[in-house]
Amino acid sequence: MRKRLKTGLWRVIHLFLACLISAGSGIAHADIPDTNSAASLRAKYLALRDTLSHNQFQLPLNLDSSQTSTDLKGDIYAFMDYPFATVSTALKGANHWCDILILHLNVKYCRESVDKPGSNLTVHIGRKTEQALNIAPRMEFKYRVDSISADYFQIFLDADKGPFGTKNYRFMLEAIPLKDGGTFIHLSYSYAYGFTAKLAMQAYLKTLGSDKVGFTVIKKLPDGQPLHVSGIRGALERNTMRYFLAINAYLGALSARPQQQLEKRLRDWFAFTERYPLQLHELEQSEYLDMKRKEYKRQQVGG
């Protein structure tokens, strides 16, 4: 009996973690003012040009994260080798975002809401393995295009409430065109969490998730090896990268034939994450592809 209770407890913690990390770290917000603009984003690009050229990711990107007693926030700034018009068109449709979000391990389902197509997304968050939708918590996100022009666009996904006491979710993406024909993007997300959520997360990260780390290097150890950020902030950074790589995989697949785009997205996303095995490796490729093909099919038929 004690063994069954212990197993049941860890299943609850696993489910909680999936919901908190994936929903929170992929689509979240905690009181970020809407003060972004083309001018400020262009200034950020100029300030980061050297960092984009020389960093640990071997990609033209910069990752920042922060944590307070109640909030988490992550930001990725990156150069993408796609025309601004391509990026703007691809990322301004609510239905396109479901094709992006489903690439993440913990996103089990995403579909435009029947009552408000084009403005609301129904998303189920769950484990990193196959899971029935009736046990994967459901969230409703409001999608809106805040600004769009020939030289700037900004979009948001917001949810007031999340599982286990999390709240104020926001996912924001903005972009500007660059003179060389590429696009500079800013992906930001944050969320607020309470005492219960914090305790459950800490319990997991001290046990089953104790070997998980993020990307920020806190310091160098005596042997010269980097010490990476861990804990809740490390979890945030891992999922920041997962969602950025999902956007990258989605954009890269647009050049393929329509019937080949899904497979290319899946394979590219997995290959991108395997560049960072210390932080992002969870499943073997065959396991991931099999799970996501089934989830995408379920998503297309509506559950």
Image (cartoon, helix red, strand yellow):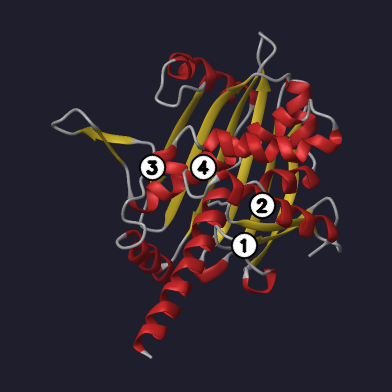
* Left or right for 283, reference 113: left
For label 1, the SS is: loop
Cα distance in 3D space between marks 3 and 1 = 25 Å
User: Which circle's residue, 4 or 1, is located before the other in the chain?
Assistant: 1
For label 2, the SS is: helix
Residue at 68% across / 74% down in the picture? 134
Q: Are marks 4 and 1 in contact (CB under 8 Å)?
A: no
Q: Nearer the viewer, residue 10 or 90?
A: 10
Q: Nearer the viewer, residue 42 or 166?
A: 166
User: Which circle's residue, 3 or 1, is located before the other in the chain?
Assistant: 1
Q: Which of pointers 4 and 1 indicates the residue nearer the eye? A: 1
Q: Which residue matches tag 3?
A: 214
For label 3, the SS is: loop
Crowdedness near tag 2: few (<14), some (14–19) or many (≥20) residues, C-alpha within 10 Å:
few
Q: Nearer the viewer, residue 38 or 224?
A: 224
Q: Which residue matches tag 2?
A: 290
Q: Check disc 4 and give the amino acid type.
A: Thr
Cα distance in 3D space between marks 4 and 1 = 22 Å
Q: Are marks 4 and 2 in contact (CB under 8 Å)?
A: no
Residue at 58% across / 65% down in the picture? 162
